Amino acid sequence: MSIGNLTELDSNLTLSDRLKVFKASQFNPDSYLQSKCNNMTEKEIKHACMNLLELRKASAEEMRKSVYANYTAFIRTSKEITVLEGELLSMRNLLSTQAALVHGLAEGVFLDSLTAGADNSEEDNILAVKNTKLNKIETWLVEYEENLEVLLAEKRVEEAMAALEEGEKVAKEQAAKEPHAKNTLSQDALQRLKNALTLLRQKLVDQLAEATCQPFTKGAELRSAVLSIKNLGDGPRAHTLLLNSHQQRLQRGMQSLRPSNNSHGGSTTSALSQLVFSTIAQASSDSLAVFGEEPAYSSELVTWAVKQTYTFALLLKRHALASSAAAGGLRVATECVQICLGHCALLEARGLALSPILMRHFRPCVDLAFNSTLKRIEQSTAALAAADDWVLSYAPGDARPFSSTLSLSSASMSQSKLSSSAHKLNSMIKAFMEDVGPLEILQLDGPALEGVLQIFNSYVNLLISALPGSMENEETLDGSGNRILKMAESESQQLALLANASLLADELLPRAALKLLPLSQANKVDATPRSTSDRQGRVPEQREWKRKLQRSVERLRDSFCRQHALDLIFTVEGDIRLNAEIYLSMDGHTEEPEWFPSPIFQELFEKLTRMASIAADMFVGRERFATLLLMRQTETVILWLSDDQNFWEEIEQGPTPLGPLGLQQFYLDMEFVMIFASEGRYLSRNLQQVIKTIIERAIEAVAATGIDPYSVLPEDDWFAEVAQIAMKMLSGKGNYSGLEGEVTSPTASAPAPAPAELHLYENRLSGFLPPTIGCLKNLNALLLHSNRFTGSIPGSFSNLTNLVHLDLHSNSLSGHIPENIGEL
């Protein structure tokens, strides 16, 4: 099995399953490495090393999670052990006291018996007692006890500590001496000394504990008192007193900074957070300085820090986050969380990871503010779209201050032309992304992208509804039946809908999403404005998200193209204009038709020409989108013709067959579409293939009638020349003047303009000139330059009132010039 297969197998196992081999009692590292690395190449060994490093990181993370999972039980057990140690110490003190009492009673009984049995006088007894007490060490003991009482009464702690140390030294020396040695305390006196030392120690602890509770005891003085208590043998109490002192200081500070329910700002949050976490940091430093890294004390410190963080989180949630989250104040929630997490990060170097406690309380509020903000953006956008006039303009002055990370390229994007609702949507989403970006620890980037995508889809649905005749228009009616969304009536307004959606999806929203990247990556992307749009797709999630935005724009584009195609194909009454009768009826006339593209394709050319002109001004810098739009619009019409079963049933199976003239007209229409689409640079391969397919289908329909279709079709140059003439006449590029008369040809849509000068350059022109030329009132020059001109000049030239120049340059002119040209 190759290393790749092993890696794929390991990736499907859980961490515990992958670690089982290392937990076995028979695990041998050398044998394991030999079995894995014996036949591996250098590349595979490096890959295995990387996998081992990943396993080590995962193992460390698993251990950390296990520690946190059982932390509560560990802390509880540590507390119980501490309490048990205190109780044992108390029991030992009680037993020592009881033993001293027993010894004292026994000694007193012995002295009473000696006194009762003696015959000496009372004075001799007193003298004997004095002589026994005049022992040097016993005299010291009497003075020592009196000195202790004075030191304790005057609370001279340092001197009392020194006296305690001296007494313990003497007691230790006396306990080591022989009972009858010189300057030796009796058992009763030694026990009395030990009892005095125990009492002194306890009273010193109480005095020091009282000192730690005073508000003026801080810093070095507090650490000294705690250290003294620890040295007196009560370390657990000393550590607890240290933490209690810091907690009291914290409570006093929070009382002075506690916010009210109706007023709370970032400054108050910052002050509270700084107070809480600086106090925790100081307590950690004091604990480490006095007690070191002993596990019992470290555990108590962690428990105390968690409790203080929990209390602070509840306070901030109650006074700041809850109300702002309910109102959709994501900015306030973001500031609070960011400030607190920043202070928490400073404590992680001390081993205190308190951010999970904050997140457990802050996350619900942030989620509420997050969802409320998204809902507010969607509602505000819908309200603004209802009043939008769909006229593009530059963005108004942005009152929101630019952040320090805003690049020059982002500032330039504010100069993009959008309608009012799109400008507002862009500014709200940009502000939303800036608010969410700093909360990387909450992992809100995915939900933020999904929420913005949902808002954009809703906005695109509104744009689709703004198209006249859209099937979604019913959704834009209120309960009374009144329209709540202004329609985009003109083509310019309808193209403005596409400009809104395309610019938002391609540039503005992806640029706003860069705020979700880590700060270093965002700055790196913003550093080169020209390549920002390319670099912003580097993150796989954002790249897929941008594709979804573009698919939503494609829905709007398809609705736009479908609506305009239906306007061309159907009349207002619902009749089909693009039907088979146009071509089937041509061969029934006795006269040969006057060749010109069919009316519907003339209108298609004029519509696309207008759209191209409007799009050239509207899609500056985004010409590709305009090209794709024109390409899609042309494809929509031709695909409808290709898929119209009724059309082809009449062509192929109808009672009236398709004749040569109908085929020629159909061929001319299709060539006309391909030529003007090619010159406009929006002829797609798909469109070209579909047109070729339906032309072949029409040719096969004619061939099925027994007629050779290629014998009746002119060469391609003829179709190209007629299409070029039609394009010039329809676009008015030949300096044509006015015209009169009606066009009677079924293949002509409207009277053509009268050219001041008409040049016909043709290698071979078969057929007739369009009859609309017959409506000309003025023709300065008619120039027919042809190697071979076949056909005739229409008799309708008799309508011409003035022909300044008729120039026929031809090597071979076949046909005739009508006699009525003499009337010119």
Image (tube, rainbow, N blue to C red):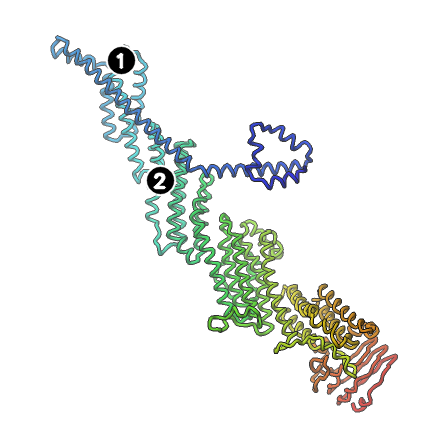
Relative to residue 113, is residue 696 drawn left or right?
Answer: right
Q: Which amino acid does label 2 sit on?
A: His
The residue at the point 84 percent across, 79 percent down is 789
* As drawn, 440 above or below 458: above
From the viewer's perspective, is the residue at label 1 or at label 2 nearer? 2
* As drawn, 519 above or below 708: above
Q: Nearer the viewer, residue 134 or 98?
A: 98
Residue 553, by quadrant, is: bottom right
- Residue 265: x and y in percent read 39, 54
- Residue 191: x and y in percent read 26, 19
Quadrant of the rendering where the C terminus is positioned? bottom right
SS under mark 1: loop
Quadrant of the rendering where the N terminus is positioned? top right
SS under mark 2: helix
Quick check: can you spot residue 756?
yes
Label of residue 183 in the image? 1
Dot 1 and dot 2 residues touching (CB under 8 Å): no
Relative to residue 516, is residue 110 drawn left or right?
Answer: left
Task: List the residue tagged with mark 2.
Answer: 246
* Neighbourhood count class around disc 2 (C-alpha, 10 Å): few under 14, some 14–19, many 20 upward: many
Quick check: can you spot residue 716?
no
* As drawn, 522 above or below 711: above
Question: Rounded to the nearest whole Å, what is the CA distance between mark 1 and mark 2?
Answer: 49 Å
Relative to residue 400, is residue 208 drawn left or right?
Answer: left
* Neighbourhood count class around disc 1 (C-alpha, 10 Å): few under 14, some 14–19, many 20 upward: few
First-in-chain label (1 vs 2): 1
